[in-house]
Amino acid sequence: MPGSLNPTAMVRLLGPWNTGAAPAYRELADVVRLLVMDGRIPLDVALPSERALAVTLGVSRTTVTAAYASLREQGFLGGGQGSRGRTGIPRRTVPVSGPGLAVPEGILDLAYASLPATGEVVHRAFADALIDLPALLPGFGYDAVGLPSLREAIADRYTAAGIPTTAAQILVTSGAQHALNIILKTLAGRQQKVLVEHPSYPNALDAIRASGSRTVPVPMPPAAEPTSGGWDIDGMVAAMRHQRPAMAYLVPDFHNPTGRIMSNLQRRRLVREAAGTGTVLVVDETLRELNLDGVSTSPLAAFSPAVVTIGSLSKSHWAGLRTGWIRAEEDLINRFVQTRTTMDLGGPVVEQLAAARLLRAFAEPLDARLAELRRNREALLGLLAEHLPGWHVERPRGGLTAWCRLPTPSSTALTVVAPDFGVRLAAGPRFGVGGAFEHFMRVPYTLAPAQLETAVLALRDAQARIDASPQLRRTLKAPKEPAAVA
């Protein structure tokens, strides 16, 4: 059942929205639009009534009515005046090459860093899974640990990478996010501390916040400091010694959003220091296989059996598989299983059968996928250099995204106006805590070069609008931490 947002929660989300730089209704509408585009107000959620929100905000009902009317005109709010409108995204038709073809999606999506399925390979895996299925039908279908065939396939891949692993060290999950939630509920929790890189993966930050844990962000050095190797290991060590976090969530392999990769020397030191402070290192390796420059590093778990590793097929094959896993020592896996059974009783069987097939033939689609990503990366970097020369772009070593420093702190404002030019973005502050990274924008290179050209030209035009209106940039600041939907 779709949810609704109560007035108090919405006021927390809005933050200091009324700056006086523009009519109040327009400022209110702009901030609500940002919250919807940024995912902080989910889609199909009923906003507070005009009267209730006006009372809670301390403004006239006319102001809220006008703001809601503006959102309806723009397509961000459904329902007529007087009814509790539900949030949505405007849908337009964008023509593509080919006679009579159109994409009904409305806008090019640069908010998500995901690829379409590896076509025939994924299809064939599911077809083969249906052949395997009858052998499992006599059973109950519940398996909180995961199908043995899939756990063995995952364990074999770790063993081949130089980390001896048994199926007993693997817990299959419904994706990497599910895995992280299980780990957080087991190892952290209310008021305990979790160290993270800053910036970091937005959904991980949201999960840490939702668990009640306290985030300990350690800034990553600027790209202009190559001697750092991309990570402030001294800062991480100091944070572990003084803050004593229960766990650390890290993305050392083609970090999201920067695309950096941590050196073996840094990995070794991090493992040693974590052992001394009792901090459990939780490593997200979802992007590890997307190695575009052929960089050679060892998985972090190769340096210590105490490292907990999260893996997934979402980036290498298809996010729709919803198949991930946790690798850890057997006694810790048993604790994770106990936690998992309070959340669900197991994942879909057919998807696990298909995933086992894909893992056994992992290299089959990977070479073509890497070649595609290299082509897309070069296209994006060239387009940004040509059309947005004021943006400083950090060259990613792998993964799916480029991390760009903007000439002005305008990331949130750019995210708000970009849909008018046909592009959807994720604002830089989504990758940090406390409203950081207004100077940054993550741009995926998951689209084909022709689409990337359209998107970059749209970004150029959106940036021009921001540059022409400093008042707009001042008005549209990132809201504070997202509040829960009631």
Image (tube, rainbow, N blue to C red):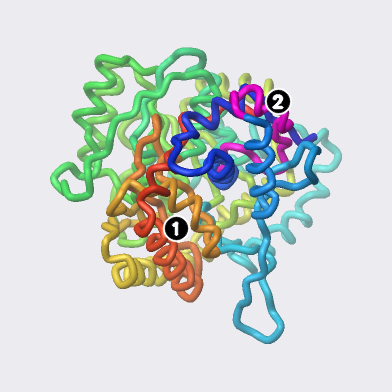
61 shown above or below 295: above
Taking the spot 52% from the left edge, 18% from the top edge, the residue there is: 212
**Depth-wise, is mark 2 or mark 1 nearer the camera?**
2
Q: Give the crowd class for mark 1: few <14, some 14-19, many >=20 residues within 10 Å.
A: many
- What is the chief secondary structure element of the magenta stretch? loop
Quarter of the image that includes the C terminus: top right
Amino acid bearing label 1: Pro
**Does the magenta-highlighted stretch encompass residue 39?**
yes
Q: Tell me residue 436's x, y (percent).
A: 35, 36
Element at badge 1?
A: strand
Taking the spot 63% from the left edge, 37% from the top edge, the residue there is: 63
Residue identified by numbered label 2: 52
Looking at the rendering, which quadrant does residue 142 occupy? top right
Q: Give the crowd class for mark 2: few <14, some 14-19, many >=20 residues within 10 Å.
A: some
For residue 347, the mark is none
Span shown in magenta: 38-59
Amino acid bearing label 2: Ala
Left or right: 376, with 485 as reference point: left
First of labels 2, 1 by sequence position = 2
Residue farthest to the right? 138
237 shown above or below 451: above
Q: Tell me residue 357's x, y (percent).
A: 63, 55
